[in-house]
Image (cartoon, coloured by chain):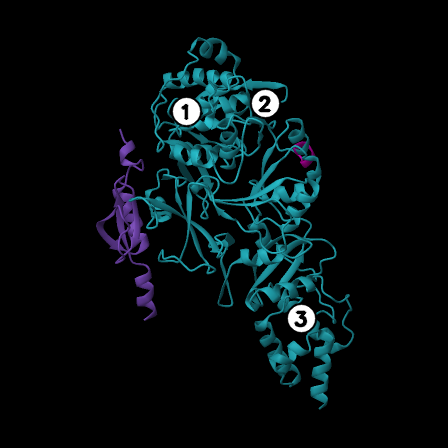
Chain colours: A purple, B cyan
Amino acid sequence: MAEAAEAALDSWTIVVNHEDQHSIWPAGRELPPGWNEIGFTGDRQACLDRISTVWKDLRPLSLRS
Amino acid sequence: MTTTVESVHPAESVHAAFERCAAATPDAVAISSGDTRVGYAELDARANRLAHHLRALGVGVESPVGICAERSVETVVALLAILKAGGHYVALDPRQPRERHATLVKEAGPDLILTQERLLPQVSGLARTVVLDDPELDRTVLSGLPATALGTEVRPGHAAYVAYTSGSTGAPKGACVPHRAVLRLVQRNNFLTAGPDDAFLMFAPLAFDASTLEIWAPLLSGARLAILPPGEPSLDELADAVVQEGVTVLWLTAGLFHQMAEGPVARLTTVRQLLAGGDVLSPHHINATFAALPGVRVVNGYGPTENTTFTCCHIMEEPVGDGPVPIGLPVTGTTVHVLDERLREVPDGATGELYAGGAGVARGYVGRPDLTADRFLPDPYAAGPGARMYRTGDLVRRRADGVVEFLGRIDNQVKVRGFRIEPGEIEAALVGRPGVKDACVVVHTHPESGKRLVAFFVADDSVLPAGLREAVAAALPPYMVPSLLARVDALPLTRNGKVDRAALEAREIRERPETNADFRAPGTALERELAALWAGLMGLDEVGVDDDFFELGGHSLMVTRIVAHVAERHGVELRPRDLYLSSTVAELAEAIEGSAAG
């Protein structure tokens, strides 16, 4: 029981906004306006590791020349 | 026709806002440093010339440019020039070793470092260098370049600077701060008034983000930036400089503010606004400041670098009561959310983590998308779509009137005998007591008795540990009452002026602490045996027979050990509550003898 509850607390989905900024959001929760899932869920660390491989340029999209 | 800074549109960039000031008041003094005076138009022209040179060296929009320089006029010229060329500055702290500069240069990627002659050895070889105080630079290069602006298009989201902070793991993290965030800090905010009659002291190291406020607040308000000469000033030197330069707005870290309030604060007669923060402020020192400087405004400024210098400010204009000093209300352009672990708002009065949204939020950590995503999260409470908020790692609660109270760092949160404890909450309770000037609570681990909370405090002699313990016990749950209260002359500080918690965690206390009783040595064999037992459990060299068990740092686990010892050695079955009733060695010895006789 307790483990299941902890796992639910550490379940996240990777999200991205219009500026190609990536972040994480509690899995299963309604997404904040302007954010979309990229289709990867996992524990916090797994999500962060994945973000390292997909988000290479931290500049907001509108400022990339 | 008169042009005022306020009447024009919000600036797109920091340097554009400065240029408007320079156009509005070209002859006003922008920088003072001893006998040197630099007017707004002159500063603008010098920065333009250097910006042309930087452009020729390859600096453009989004270029990182290193700067390793002491406080000086040419340093300020250089910062402006970097922005005017479209770049952003990466401060390399001259007090740090060359290896750290190398790490930062490798990560932030500047291929150009602006420096001064005497600091050149620290950075030469790490990137190309420009020596700002080289007379040849002026004579042979800059004098031939235009004094007019480059006209680079820089937008509010473009980077203005990268500020490195030490992460909890020790690896430095570079927060990349956009122009928008600086403008929101220094223009038309709710915690500061700045105008042509004001002078700000340039005091904080460039690598420390208080410098953002110190430098850009005056230069974007038509005020004067007064430069403190390089080096670490004594309190008296600092006070002298403040008065000589006519400084009206001064920022001090909490540690230095407390020292100043104990020292020459009364000499800061020119100061109208005194901002302090970075650690918990004590009401005692705030009130000492009001007593010494009638009419001064004291501002408790709170905020992480990642939300650009200040997130909340608490403005005080009259003496404050005992009790923790709040961090106040969000600064203009910033929203504050108090959330639980799943990013849901907690009710007013409940403890949660502070998340900061709005224009002050940094872009992220240079070269670290994973750390960025971990700390910069979607802001579901923002007005616009796609916004982010910064997770501060600070525990706070919001009062019904909107004022925010700081409770401590999540990182500092400790677990002692199963309870999750925020040292900041205990520190705030201690510092809120009359006569207590400073406090830091850490956990010590003792091989015999395990973890215990130790409070180091600075206070007037009239404050006794026993009385302090009682006061704290009345305000906090029992598990948050420190086992030991140790008086110190001053809390140790790190090089950035923050309380050095690690030093206090490592400080061993073997001396018998102050208790309500004078020291009396054990007389009987039983007293000697019990005193030795207590001292061993508590990690002390000696205890007196009239010392109170709890004042010495005793706790329930030790009670169990003592009860077991007495049962084994003397065949007397004490109950734990006997120790609460007979809480000195003398009383306990008497109780044991009484039981054995009965």
Q: Which label lies toward us, 3 or 1? A: 1
Q: Which chain does the numbered disc 3 sit on?
A: B
Mark 2 crowdedness (10 Å alpha carbons): few <14, some 14-19, many ≥20: many
Residue in the image at 51% along x and 53% along y: B406
Q: Main secondary structure of the magenta part?
A: helix
Q: Position of residue A54 (x, y in %)?
A: 25, 43
Q: In the image, what residue type sits under mark 3?
A: Phe
Q: In the image, what residue type sits under mark 1?
A: Ala
In this rendering, is residue B154 above or below B335? above
Which of the two discs, 2 and 1, labels the residue nearer the N terminus? Answer: 1
* Numbered badge on residue B317: none
Mark 2 vs 1: CB contact within 8 A: no
Residue hosting label 2: B32
Residue hosting label 1: B16
Q: Position of residue B135 (x, y in %)?
A: 53, 13
Q: Which label lies toward us, 2 or 1? A: 1
Q: Is residue B178 shown to the viewer in this render?
A: no
Q: Position of residue B414 (x, y in %)?
A: 50, 60
State the quadrant of the C terminus of chain B: bottom right
Which of the two discs, 3 and 1, labels the residue nearer the N terminus? Answer: 1
Disc 2 and disc 1: Cα gap in Å?
22 Å
Residue hosting label 3: B549
Report whether mark 3 lies on the same chain as mark 1: yes
Q: Is residue B329 magenta?
A: no
In this rendering, is residue B352 above or below B53? below
The magenta segment: B234-238
